Amino acid sequence: MSKLSNKVAIVTGASKGIGAAIARHLAEAGAAVVVNYASSKEGADRVVADITRQGGRAVAVQANVASGEEIDRMFDLNVLGVLLASKAAAAHFDAAGGSIINISSVASTLTPASSSVYSASKAAVDAVTRVLAKELGPRNIRVNAINPGMVETEGVHAAGLDAGDFRKQLEAQTPLGRIGQPQDVAPAVVFLASAEAGWITGETLAISGGAR
């Protein structure tokens, strides 16, 4: 039996990058996947098609997890979005409980220069993860965070961070000598969602090639 048979997984921001890889891996592990997207319907439909082509189950759903209105984007998406999505998820878990996995960043502890707002928002995600783990634990709901290092995604390419001195410097500071790929992150999400992680909650798991 697959690790996540008879489970339903909702993956926010799943139309591309890390979210898309997570959706695909969860489906491979047997979960029925809700592929959430904010604006890229084409990307979400592509992820759903990939999953169903492999015999999995998935559906694309558009929703802004931060707010019904556009407000301060960074904190709304990274912090308020986590809180609202967690609250909505918790309301639907039954007595069997479940698992909430937040995507934070190693930037919350690495705190690179010129990233004060981003690093602060991800540090808040780490704190929210620990608080919710304590609040929801009595309901058998586990809450953990994945903290990736730099991962080569569409957003990284769009920002021009996939090449040049910034990438070279980061790779030089990373024990494994490279930046990550979405598929480096997704298996850890499957593990935290599965029964194998049944006694793990309130943790932040760095997946960063050793960068700290």
Image: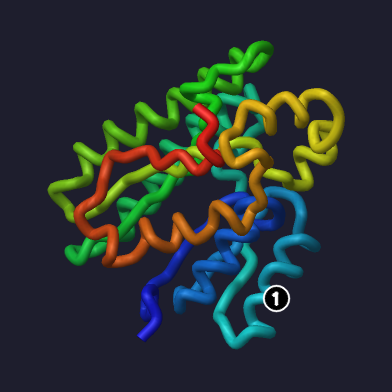
The image position of residue 172, as x and y in percent, is: 68, 28
In this figure, which residue is indicated by the disc labeled 1? 50
Neighbourhood count class around disc 1 (C-alpha, 10 Å): few under 14, some 14–19, many 20 upward: some
Residue at x 66%, y 51% (from the top left corner):
181
Callout 1 secondary element:
helix
The image position of residue 159, as x and y in percent, is: 82, 32
- All told, the count of numbered labels is 1
- For the residue pair 159 and 10, the one nearer the viewer reads as 159
Q: How is the image coloured?
A: rainbow
Most distant residue in the left direction: 138
In the drawing, does residue 45 fall left or right of residue 210?
Answer: right
In the drawing, does residue 94 fall left or right of residue 29?
Answer: left
- For the residue pair 14 and 110, the one nearer the viewer reads as 110
Residue at x 55%, y 44% (from the top left corner):
65
Above/below status of 120 relative to 101: above
Task: Place residue 157 in its image quadrant.
Answer: top right
**Which amino acid lies under the numbered mark 1 shown in the image of this protein?**
Asp
The image position of residue 133, as x and y in percent, is: 25, 41
- For the residue pair 87 and 206, the one nearer the viewer reads as 206
- For the residue pair 175 and 73, the one nearer the viewer reads as 175
The image position of residue 138, as x and y in percent, is: 13, 48
Tell me the quarter of the image containing the N terminus.
bottom left
Regarding residue 81, the answer to whether it shows in the image is no
In the drawing, does residue 87 fall left or right of residue 212?
Answer: left
Above/below status of 48 relative to 207: below
Residue at x 55%, y 41% (from the top left corner):
209
Above/below status of 185 relative to 178: below
Regarding residue 12, the answer to whether it shows in the image is yes
